[in-house]
Image (cartoon, helix red, strand yellow):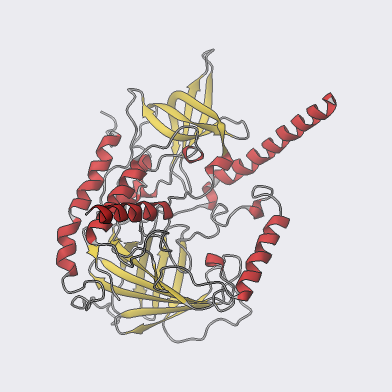
Amino acid sequence: MAHRFPVLVRGLVVPAALLWLATVPAAGQARSAGARPGGSAAKAYTPPRTPDGQPDLQGIWSNTTITPLERPKGVTGEFFTPEEAIEAAKRAAAEEAEQTEPGTIADVHYDFTQFGLDRSQSAMALSLRTSLIVDPTDGKLPPLSEEGRRRAAERAAERKRRGGPHDAVQNEPLGARCILMDRNGPPMIGGAYNNDYQIMQAPGYVMILTEMLHDVRIIPLDGRPHLPPNVRQWTGSYRGRWEGQTLVVETTNLTDKFAFQGASENMRLTERFTRTDEDTIRYQFTVDDPSTWTRPWSAEVLWKKTTGPIFEHACHEGNYGLYNTLSGARAEEKRNAEEAAKKGSLK
Amino acid sequence: MRTRRASVAVAVAALLAAAPLLAHHAFSAEFDINKPIRLQGTITKWEMINPHSWFHVDVKDPDGKVVPWMIEGGSPNQLIKAGVTKKTLALGTELIIEGYQAKDGSNKAVGRNLLLADGSRLVLGGSAPDVPTTLEPPRK
């Protein structure tokens, strides 16, 4: 036999997903002893040290989550019970393994399951939180400031002025142009798939490689000042320091082109990485941008240890989709123009 | 308890509705919902590239003429982690592709469903090498 390839019928995928979920409650109970909502924290974990004495965050991690950034309508509690969280994860796994309805927009897509891209097939820490946002405690983004509202309106007007989403390559989203994805951030928040990161540490530095779109942050720990204010970068100017077991990274000098959740270039981001056990990093971040929101806000995502290798996500080189989208839009314009001309000549 | 069960159902449904899976770009802008296709052909090449992989497939038209098609699929990264290589799917394997043709009318399509000749679904992933085993307690 020349090749034995791992072909599975779909029926096997969902039971596999449920199998891992079945392992969750026992481990969860063991780990959450003494750490109920509002209670005292579990026994503090002390991570190993790197040769130069830093708490060791090294490894390959996944921040895949099914928890939305903002708490959905109809959910009032800050936390699910373990049973509810497991039920949500089972439902998510089952829904993602379902095939889409022919003739619907959602169906014009490849199938995630066929490529192992369901979230249930990725390393994922199940959180009891009902939203990633932890502050404000209602789990929602704070209200926009007056300047934030004005800028949102200006940005919407500018988008309109530039024409349709496929009129020019510059109108396409940053992700479709292989410039920046939400996994990059900053802050780094997982998307549908490929939510993997590799952390390496060297004396004086922490390096974080984001799988998608293969971007690297080399974070200096020596207390050097930020870049001058006139130097603006997609992922900003980032400087780190250790506070006990926690790596704290301050990021400034962003541009207004990424505009995380509508933020301005004045956004100041504070990220905290704390290894809470062998397999988990608690990633917390605070966004402070009075030019956009009436108050700072914070969120928390759990990163789960996973295996490598991380395959290079050379996005731009293989981005046939961008060409196809633009040529599809031109073909559609041509058809519409021909039909309009035909109608005109019939009058 | 009846009311509690109901509120859980609402909460779970809302949670799922709020965190959809979104791919790298809008496929409905690249492919035409009004041009569903079903092709049968043999694989001549599998480009395991990002952001999306592409299957090159030779399809015989009704006159027996061989027409090359390109079929868009998912990012290969997760598959590579699971040990899948471009040789996993042998050249010459017969595939049935259900999908939608490119808006520009070229012989390209998105493969919304890939089937083997015997009608079974092709699932290249499907195993879960890294499984969550902990339910992280919340922290205040």
Image location (x, y in percent) of residue A1: 25, 28
Q: Quadrant of the C terminus of chain A?
A: top right
Asked whether residue B132 is in view, the answer is: no
Image location (x, y in percent) of residue A171: 65, 54
Q: Say whether residue A84 is left or right of residue B117.
A: left
Q: Say whether residue A149 is left or right of residue A127.
A: right
Residue depicted at 25% across the width and 50% down the height: B129
Residue depicted at 38% across the width and 39% down the height: B86
User: Above or below — where is A43 with respect to B26?
Assistant: below
Image location (x, y in percent) of residue A115: 37, 42
Asked whether residue A231 is in view, the answer is: yes
Please count the marks in the image: 0
Q: Pick out the residue farthest to the top.
A: B63
Give whichever of A127, B54 is nearer the camera. A127
Give whichever of B78, A187 is nearer the camera. A187
User: Above or below — where is A93 with respect to A37?
Assistant: above
Give whichever of A92, B70 is nearer the camera. A92
Q: Say whether residue B96 is left or right of residue B110.
A: left
Residue depicted at 52% across the width and 18% down the height: B61
User: Above or below — where is A26 with respect to B102?
Assistant: below
Image location (x, y in percent) of residue A148: 60, 72
Q: Say whether residue A332 is left or right of residue B86.
A: right
